[in-house]
Image (cartoon, helix red, strand yellow):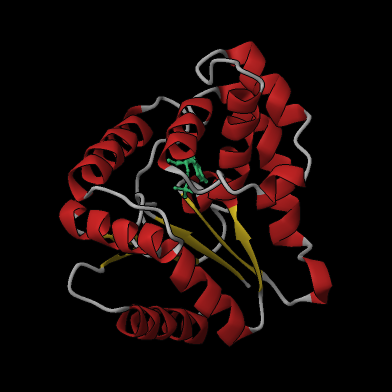
Amino acid sequence: MIIAVDGPAAAGKGTLARNLARHFGLAYLDTGALYRAVGLAVLESGGDPHDPETATSAAKQLGFDLFDHPDLRNEATGEAASAVAAIPAVREALLSFQRTFAENPPGERGGAVLDGRDIGTVVCPETPFKIFLVADPAVRAERRVKELRNRGVEAISAEILRDMEHRDAQDKSRTISPLVPARDAFVLDTTELDADAVFAAAVDFVNAKNGMN
Ligand code: C5P
């Protein structure tokens, strides 16, 4: 079983994906962390994340050391991730790792949950379990501010909203793997829902699909 969870920034993908993985006993991969690690590697080397050669070489040499970096979750890293993510050779370099993880998940699990932007459309288009989360931008910005504050990072809502909308626009308008729901995705608006309600709706969807297959 492969469950794809896609959607814009701070729509609740990570929380839902982790909850689904625990519930169904599946492995979990945060694919945004891969793009963030590439973006961060470029920033750390003083390079330009928009430069295809620099970003592609960082993607090809990606190690696991950056995944614990304190700056991985910063908005600046998110912006750099969005820049490198628009470069086709970067996406190509990260694709096989994601597909291998989905098809042969670690720990002999019976499947995997992947969250990102193009899991249902490009990485695992064959899976019937595709969930696409959406939410009002102002609500998403508030959630991100709360998340940052919980980690001890002070953030200004208006700035987070502006950065997030810029990143979403970039992710939606790129020519390769744009952020768009797959035609057969279950689109769930989480604006008015808490994490438990989102989880319950997603479990219902997966179980209903399972019964139909
Ligand atoms: O999910 P997260 O906000 O950590 O992702 C950071 C950036 O990585 C996104 O804004 C997007 O540009 C890129 N990304 C992507 N495809 C994915 C996951 C993330 O393009 N599957």
Determine the image quadrant of residue 133.
bottom left
Does residue 99 appear anywhere in the picture?
yes
Q: Is residue 31 left or right of residue 142?
A: right
For the point 67% across and 49% down, which residue is it? 67
Determine the image quadrant of residue 56.
top right
Q: Is residue 197 above or below residue 83?
A: below
Q: Is residue 27 left or right of residue 23?
A: right
Determine the image quadrant of residue 130.
bottom left
For the point 23% across and 40% down, which residue is it? 159
* Residue 83, horizontal then vertical, whole percent: 47, 26
Q: Is residue 201 above or below residue 7?
A: below
Q: Is residue 147 left or right of residue 97?
A: left
* Residue 147, horizontal then vertical, whole percent: 38, 62
In depth, the one of 87 and 3 nearer the eye is 87
For the point 57% across and 57% down, which residue is it? 126
For the point 64% across and 47% down, which residue is it? 69
* Residue 19, horizontal then vertical, whole percent: 51, 79
Q: Where is the N terminus found, in terms of image quarters?
A: bottom right
Q: Is residue 88 above or below residue 75?
A: above
Does residue 91 appear anywhere in the picture?
no
* Residue 82, horizontal then vertical, whole percent: 45, 33
Q: Is residue 2 above or below residue 141?
A: below
